[in-house]
Image (spheres, rainbow, N blue to C red):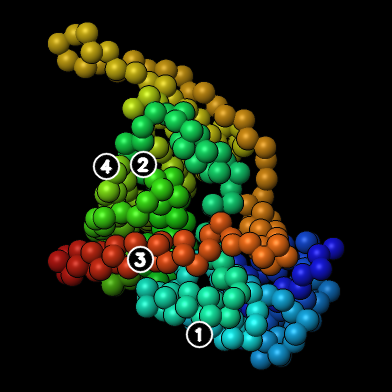
Amino acid sequence: MSNTRIAQIGVGHWGKNLARNYAQLGALAAVADYHAPTAERIAQEHGTEARSFEDILADDSIHGVSLATPAETHADVAIAALEAGKHVYVEKPLALLPADGERMAAKAEEVGKILMVGHLLQYHPIFRKAKELVAGGAIGQLRYVYSNRLSLGKFRTEENVMWSFAPHDFSMLLAMVGEAPDAVTAEGAAWITPGIADWCTAHLQFPGGVRGHVQTSWSHPFKEARLVAVGDEGMLVFEDSAPEWDRKLAIYRHGIDRSGPAPAPIKADPEYIAVEQGEPLRSECQHFIDCIEQGTQPLTDVAEGLRVLKVLDRAEAALQASLGEKK
């Protein structure tokens, strides 16, 4: 049972999962949702109260709030919570505009409270191992990294596929490379809902020479969630869509034979990497609680969220230009 009390604001499609995890960690103090029957149902499931957002902010016994509200509300809701003296977790993306993210960051610094962003895959045990392997030189010098997040649906009309899927992937790429890109381009297409991209590919160029791309689509025949990092001494694959846990992370030590008139590949079998199994969302929720109790900054703090948001903003501008050209 945690001594830290967290209120979950928004208990819909994703918020209900956050509420469940905080409840299982013994930290759920209350829930709130604009749809009162949903709030009441989730509250009853977890033996807590459904309360208004205003009541939660006025309750000094609640230490933090977790926000899973529409992205356009993140800035105002988070700032209100920070002003009320609450630590804040906000589901990705941090906000829709860098200017709003900057306002959120400034308020968190002003009041001395934690502002954490829900970049879930940073808490995935396999991604954490993959990042550790790359940083430790397991595949040599990193040259190229890409992430595919593809599926059939869920189609959205309030945001495009890049904003829906890519925050996780941009977060992983920036963490693995260790710097922000100096060039971002993107292209996409809108087939299902006019003006709402169903497919997008963003290209990133980093100051140190690493290149990368993120491809997202909800018009794909099957689910694919794959991160690939290519180095000069090997290739690492994080296959999150693989059904078996022990087949999700592999290193390929392919080589190149340069003895002939043209370079030829020397193929190698994959080396599967053992990683202790864990639940990313549970780890993420526990991390928020730990940071509150210990007074430490989260792995995905507001600065990390801003870096990702700025890449999203640059990619969005390029994507919209691409869509405009295809009309």
Q: Residues within 10 Å of mark 4 (few under 14, many from 20)?
A: few
Q: Which residue sits at x=50%, y=30%?
A: 250
- Nearest to viewer (mark 4 / mark 3): 4
The residue singled out by tag 3 in the image is: 310
Q: Which residue sits at x=67%, y=65%?
A: 295
The residue singled out by tag 1 in the image is: 76
- SS for dot 1: helix
Q: CA distance from mark 4 to mark 3?
A: 20 Å
Q: CA distance from mark 3 to mark 1?
A: 19 Å
Q: CA distance from mark 4 to mark 1?
A: 38 Å
Between 153 and 55, the residue placed more toward the observer is: 55
Mark 4 / mark 3, whichever is N-terminal: 4
At label 1, the amino acid type is Asp
The residue singled out by tag 2 in the image is: 145
Q: Which residue sits at x=28%, y=65%?
A: 314
The residue singled out by tag 4 in the image is: 209
At label 4, the amino acid type is Gly
Q: In this image, 103 relative to 285: left or right? A: left
Q: CA distance from mark 1 to mark 2?
A: 35 Å
- Nearest to viewer (mark 2 / mark 3): 3
- SS for dot 3: helix
Between 234 and 325, the residue placed more toward the observer is: 234
Residue 215 in view of the camera: no
